[in-house]
Amino acid sequence: MSKGTFSTTTQERYLEDFVEGSKGTVYGGLIASGWHTCSLFMRMFVEHYLPGPASLGSPGVDELRWLNPVRSGDELTLRTRVHKVKPSRSKPDRGVLYSFCEMVNHKNEVVATMMGLNLIRYRNVG
């Protein structure tokens, strides 16, 4: 076993198997997992985009993609675009908001994209 490469049996690892920095990966260093990136993505989406009291949750997301690695020190920004607004046929007080979202790093590289689906209440239903 070469340094930095591990078997699935954790009991076989010793101190010399742990290498600082792990630059020997295909990414050239430490990166965030896709799911960690997604959690940051969703936090920004909920805190800075969704309309608080009008938001009724989400049936999910479509087309989630991790396009570039997120590295320690990256500054991330969320860009959103309204893709479609679809009124509910069964519940006249709400509809589905489809938002195309991109997370970009400080180099303006897109690191992740998704199509968010959110149930949003109308302001006034008469």
Image (cartoon, grey):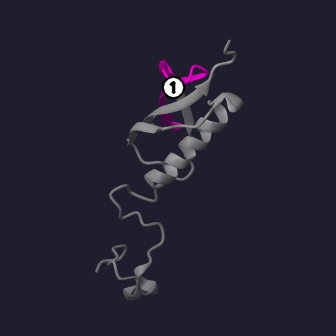
| Mark 1, other Cα within 10 Å: few <14 / some 14–19 / many ≥20 | some
Task: From the viewer's side, name the closer residue of 115 and 107.
Answer: 115
Q: In this view, does 34 lie to the left or right of 76?
A: left
Whether residue 112 is visible to the viewer of this picture, yes or no, is: no
Task: From the viewer's side, name the closer residue of 113 and 124.
Answer: 124
Part of the protein shown in magenta: 82-108
Quadrant of the image occupied by residue 12: bottom left
For mark 1, what is the residue?
Answer: 96
Residue under the point 49% across and 27% down: 99
Q: Is residue 100 positioned above or below 40 on the image?
A: above
Task: From the viewer's side, name the closer residue of 121 and 42.
Answer: 121
What is the tally of numbered marks visible in this picture? 1
Q: Is mark 1 on a helix, strand or loop?
A: strand
Task: From the viewer's side, name the closer residue of 7 and 14.
Answer: 7
Q: Does the magenta stretch include residue 94?
A: yes
Whether residue 44 is visible to the viewer of this picture, yes or no, is: yes
Q: Is residue 2 positioned above or below 113 on the image?
A: below
Q: Is residue 16 magenta?
A: no
How far across and down, in percent of the image, does residue 108 sit? 48, 32
The kind of residue tagged 1 is Val
Quadrant where the N terminus sits is bottom left
How far across and down, in percent of the image, does residue 75 sit? 58, 41
How far across and down, in percent of the image, does residue 47 sit? 66, 37
Which residue in the rendered view is the most extreme toward the front? Answer: 90
